Amino acid sequence: MKSQRRRLLVTGGAGFIGANFVHYWRHHHPTDELVVLDALTYAGNRMNLADLESAQGLEFIHGDIVDQPLAERLIREREIDTVAHFAAESHVDRSIVGPDQFITTNVLGTHSLLKACRKVWIEEKKQHGHRFHHISTDEVYGSLEPDQPAFTEDSPYAPNSPYSASKAASDHLVRAYFHTYGLQVTTTNCSNNYGPYHFPEKLIPLMIVNALHGKPLPVYGDGRNVRDWLYVTDHCAAIDLVLSAGTPGTTYNVGGDCERDNLTLIGLLCDLLDDAFVRRRDLCRRFRDAPAACGGKSADLIAFVKDRPGHDRRYAIDSSLIRDELGFVPKVDLERGLRSTIEWYLANEAWWRAVMSGAYRDWVARNYAAR
């Protein structure tokens, strides 16, 4: 992509990774114009962008990516030249309980966006300086055994949940629009992200919030499922590199070079949270039910629960392509990233209390109480 001023459409920009990307992009590219399109479903939250909404060059549109006429209108009227496509249903447990919405958003929604971009950029404007960047997941590759090498961009797809299957389908559609229609696309398949604005149904924020309330820390199975962990701002930096210098039609794997099993990760997270209580005595007054408030250990709350269906054993990412071609190296190690994440949640209690109210709270009660 050219280094000139860009006009980006960021889908899902009020969600976890999308909101972090919007903050990252405003900081690193302050003259670019951003249009955020988000349906504001349970995981999309305008509070995530509250400190940016009055900024010049940022516009928020409440809408659904399945709405192709809306996408066409935004791309055409806002003269969009770059789409950063984050919008997706992404929680595996939810996909098991109700897969239909995952197919609608992740497959049909992505296809609607691709069609809109093709119509405006290729058929109407014959615009060569465009880019459609698709954010995907390492889960499309399936599961690894402990001694198997990490996933590369050439690993065969073998999705094992409705969520990962829907993302795999969207990946194939993006690739097809490059080879069939010449749409200038790139894709990143990332490992597990964590950091600020992470919706509290996901592992790390759920553990933090439950520990603060003295509630059980639910661990599936034996807790030895392995994931590669990537701090969200490192992921945003990788996307920046791909948008700036990535080769159209190419997929890049983005990992944090940090494989940990869930039990080890949760143990470290608990230790760091306990340490925060030692360093900050005000936390003992704010969170009286936390074990650390009375000298106990958060890890004592760990409770093993029945494993979920089709739970992949191990993911691992080989990021050598994006490292060798674009120079990407993650900067935030796990301990530093977890400390930063804990501090953000401690500083933003009003945010997570708000997002945990209502429908989300009821869903957690129904799904975790039975396990």
Image (cartoon, grey):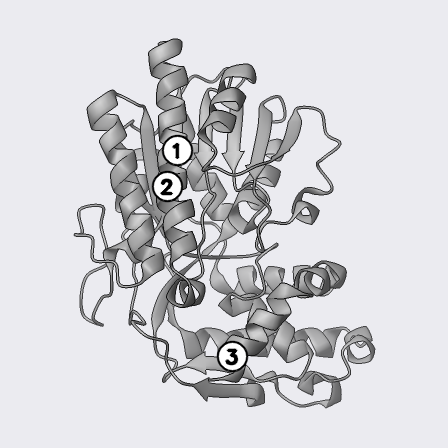
Q: CA distance from mark 3 to mark 2?
A: 30 Å
Can residue 244 be seen by looking at this rendering?
yes
For the residue labelled by badge 3, is the local secondary structure a helix, a strand or a loop? helix
Q: Which residue appears at 32% of the width and 24% of the height?
A: 184
- Which residue is disc 3 drawn over? 368
The quarter of the rendered structure image containing the N terminus is top left
Amino acid type of the residue that numbered disc 3 sits on in the rendered structure: Tyr
For the residue labelled by badge 1, is the local secondary structure a helix, a strand or a loop? helix
Front residue (pair 72, 332): 72
Q: Quadrant of residue 223?
A: bottom left
Q: Which residue appears at 72% of the width and 65% of the height?
A: 353
**Disc marking residue 128:** none
Front residue (pair 171, 61): 61
- Which residue is disc 1 drawn over? 112
- Which residue is disc 2 drawn over? 108
Q: Is residue 135 above or below residue 133?
A: below
Amino acid type of the residue that numbered disc 1 sits on in the rendered structure: Ser
Q: Quadrant of residue 199?
A: bottom right
Amino acid type of the residue that numbered disc 2 sits on in the rendered structure: Leu
Q: Are marks 1 and 2 in contact (CB under 8 Å)?
A: yes
Is 148 on the left or on the right of 242, as rendered? left
Local crowd at mark 2 within 10 Å, few (<14), some, or many (≥20)? many
Q: Is residue 124 above or below residue 206?
A: above
Can residue 127 be seen by looking at this rendering?
no
Front residue (pair 2, 115): 115
**Of pointers 3 and 2, the one earlier in the residue sequence:** 2
Q: Which residue appears at 47% of the width and 22% of the height?
A: 72
Looking at the picture, how far across and down is residue 195, in whole percent? Answer: 56, 56
Looking at the picture, how far across and down is residue 242, in whole percent? Answer: 38, 33
